[in-house]
Image (cartoon, coloured by chain):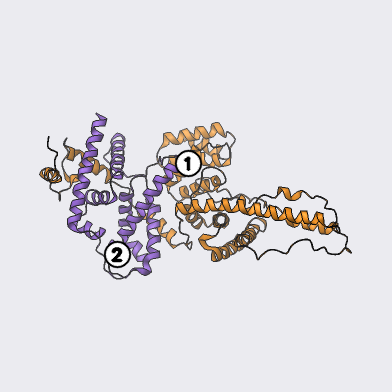
């Protein structure tokens, strides 16, 4: 995790330094149906708008993460509404790069499994969903999650604990249904 | 049987996996946690944001367009208010004209109106040129927008009320006393009328004069005066996109198109197919395919938009390595449009 200094950067520097990290966060927070490029574009548009108000009191990464989380959340809401509104499902899942050793069958299984994970995550409250994504998928430590999301460390562990309970319950339900 | 308390459940989970240890780091197994870990591992793989994507989004950010996407709810509210406002305005205009013509008929000095019932056809409050903004078709893939077809002739209808007045003036004898017929205009031009005038000028510059730069200048004036809250801002944006495409400023056009919520039916289809082609041209295959799918899922007529969408999707799928689906699209294309614009390219692609 980049521990950026607290001075106020310009947008170009911000983009060059953090675009890749932001894209990774966005991809994981928004799920496999999201268009990551569009999300990154939107995130940095918001950043450009808010940059004059950024006083450098928080770390740049924290500030960017909050924007990313809001934009990803908004994107999920819009996507749900759009699907409902147009009766159309986004059929095309964002392309993912499969590890080279995977066969097409393995890759298909991996993709289906990934979709199942996000279906389960989408049923959770946002605070649980976020913490499990950051801890398990983004592999951040509890302290890093607390710094990024602005909640206390103890709260992070409580949220993670509850998120895991819900996740396990859903996994069991999915397993029962498939057997 | 005693129900487990929260503490019991926490202890139970803690017994299995300490909270600080990741499920994704667990070895494969058959326990619920191992299964959950394996599932989560599969979701951790995402497409890397490479140098190409970095450059592309960077270029979009650096482009001069400052258009921010409007929230969907606001778009819907604007559409609803536009329809409502249009209805009220057309009713008001038709009422005023009816009263004015009635007054004219009642005056003894008034010359007989040659076609007194023309006003009955007045219905729309919006200029016809605004109702159907014609987007120039983008060039088919793989070079979607290089050759833009000739712009459509302008479809602006003359102002019918003005025509009636001119006709009556022509019929009246020159020596006749000017009858105090028409009441003076009630007030200054409404903001909608002002918007319509600006937009009509922009469209005339774009389609009649072929001067896209000038049209953009006029549209900037509209933006400065009305911003995002103008009633005709969606039409202004459509015209701006058309002008940008004519000038070959595809990045800016795409940035604007990206911000639109486009329908796969009606006039939105042309914009949707243009967006899909531009996205495909920029290598954004997933979002391009999404647009193409929307176009082809709707009850698509066999028109040029469908033709472009079908061919575009085939090319996109081919480039994504999904050759089987691409072949199906090419076959469907050739079955539907055997003499279509891209028929030769489709055949060539299938023979490769």
Q: What percent of the width, then of the height, locates residue B1?
A: 12, 34
Q: Nearer the viewer, residue B255 or B94?
A: B94
Q: Disc 1 designates what residue?
A: B294
How many numbered marks does the figure carry?
Answer: 2
What chain does mark 2 sit on? A
Q: Using a 10 Å C-alpha cutoff, classify the residue at mark 1 as few (fewer than 14 neighbours), some (14 to 19) or many (20 or more).
A: many
Chain letter for the residue marked with disc 1 in the picture: B
Question: In the picture shown, does residue B57 fall above or below A161?
Answer: below
Measured from the top left, where is residue A110 in percent x and y? 28, 39
- Does residue B166 appear to the left or right of B302 in the view shown? right
**Residue B167 appears in the rendering:** no
Residue found at x 33% / y 46%: A31
In this view of the protein, which residue sits in the foreground, B97 or A131? B97
Shown colour of chain A: purple
Q: Residue at x 34, y 49 (%)?
A: A30
Q: Is residue A116 above or below residue B177?
A: above
Tint of chain B? orange
Q: Which residue lies under the disc numbered 2?
A: A60
Nearest the viewer among B236 and A77 is A77
- Check disc 2: other Cα within 10 Å, few if <14, some if 14-19, many if 20+: many
Q: Is residue B306 left or right of residue B91?
A: left
Q: Is residue A60 at all visible to an observer of this figure?
A: yes
Q: Which mark is residue B234?
A: none
In screen coordinates, is B18 left or right of B204? left
Q: CA distance from mark 1 to mark 2?
A: 38 Å
Q: Position of residue B142 (x, y in %)?
A: 49, 46
Label 2 secondary element = helix
Q: Nearer the viewer, residue B183 or A16?
A: B183
Which quadrant holds residue B5?
A: top left
**Image coords of residue B100 (percent x, y):** 75, 56
Q: Secondary structure at mark 1?
A: helix
Discs 1 and 2 carry the same chain letter:
no
């Amino acid at each position: 995790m980049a521990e950026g200094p607290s001075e106020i950067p310009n947008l170009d520097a911000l983009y060059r330094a953090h675009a890749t990290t932001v894209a990774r966060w966005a991809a994981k927070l928004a799920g496999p149906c999201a268009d990551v490029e569009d999300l990154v574009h939107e995130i940095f548009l918001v950043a450009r708008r808010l940059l004059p108000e950024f006083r450098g009191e928080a770390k740049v990464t924290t500030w960017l993460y909050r924007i990313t989380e809001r934009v990803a959340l908004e994107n999920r809401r819009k996507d749900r509404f759009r699907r409902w509104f147009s009766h159309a499902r986004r059929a095309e899942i964002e392309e993912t790069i499969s590890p080279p050793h995977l066969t097409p069958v393995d890759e298909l299984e991996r993709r289906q499994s990934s979709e199942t994970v996000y279906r389960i995550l989408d049923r959770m409250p946002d605070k649980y969903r976020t913490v499990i994504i950051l801890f398990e998928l983004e592999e951040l430590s509890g302290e890093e999650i607390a710094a990024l999301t602005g909640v206390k460390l103890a709260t992070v562990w409580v949220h993670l604990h509850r998120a895991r309970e819900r996740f396990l319950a859903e996994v069991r339900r999915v397993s029962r249904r498939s057997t | 049987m005693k129900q487990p308390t929260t503490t019991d459940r926490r202890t139970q989970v803690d017994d299995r996996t300490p909270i600080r240890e990741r499920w994704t780091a667990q070895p494969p197994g058959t326990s619920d946690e191992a299964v959950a870990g394996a599932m989560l591992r599969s979701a951790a793989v995402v497409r890397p944001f490479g140098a190409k994507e970095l450059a592309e989004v960077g270029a979009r950010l650096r482009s001069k367009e400052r258009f921010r996407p409007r929230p969907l709810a606001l778009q819907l509210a604007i559409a609803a208010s536009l329809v409502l406002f249009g209805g009220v305005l057309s009713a008001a205009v038709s009422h005023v004209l009816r009263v004015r013509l009635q007054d004219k008929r009642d005056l003894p000095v008034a010359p007989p109106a040659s076609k007194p019932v023309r006003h009955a056809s007045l219905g729309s409050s919006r200029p016809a040129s605004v109702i159907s903004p014609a987007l120039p078709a983008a060039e088919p893939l793989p070079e979607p927008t290089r050759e833009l077809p000739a712009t459509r002739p302008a479809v602006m209808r003359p102002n019918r009320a003005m025509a009636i007045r001119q006709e009556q003036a022509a019929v009246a004898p020159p020596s006749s006393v000017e009858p105090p017929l028409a009441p003076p205009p009630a007030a200054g031009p409404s903001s909608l009328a002002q918007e319509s005038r600006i937009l009509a000028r922009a469209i005339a510059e774009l389609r009649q004069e072929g001067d896209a730069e000038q049209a953009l200048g006029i549209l900037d004036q509209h933006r400065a005066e009305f911003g995002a809250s103008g009633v005709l801002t969606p039409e202004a944006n459509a015209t701006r996109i058309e002008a940008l495409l004519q000038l070959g400023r595809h990045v800016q056009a795409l940035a604007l198109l990206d911000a639109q919520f486009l329908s796969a039916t009606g006039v939105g289809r042309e914009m949707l197919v243009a967006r899909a082609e531009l996205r495909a041209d920029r290598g954004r295959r997933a979002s391009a395919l999404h647009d193409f799918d929307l176009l082809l899922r709707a009850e698509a007529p066999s028109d040029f938009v469908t033709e472009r969408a079908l061919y575009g999707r085939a090319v996109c799928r081919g480039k994504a390595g999904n050759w089987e689906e691409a072949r199906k699209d090419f076959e469907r294309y050739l079955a539907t449009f055997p003499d279509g614009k891209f028929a030769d390219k489709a055949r060539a692609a299938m023979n490769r």
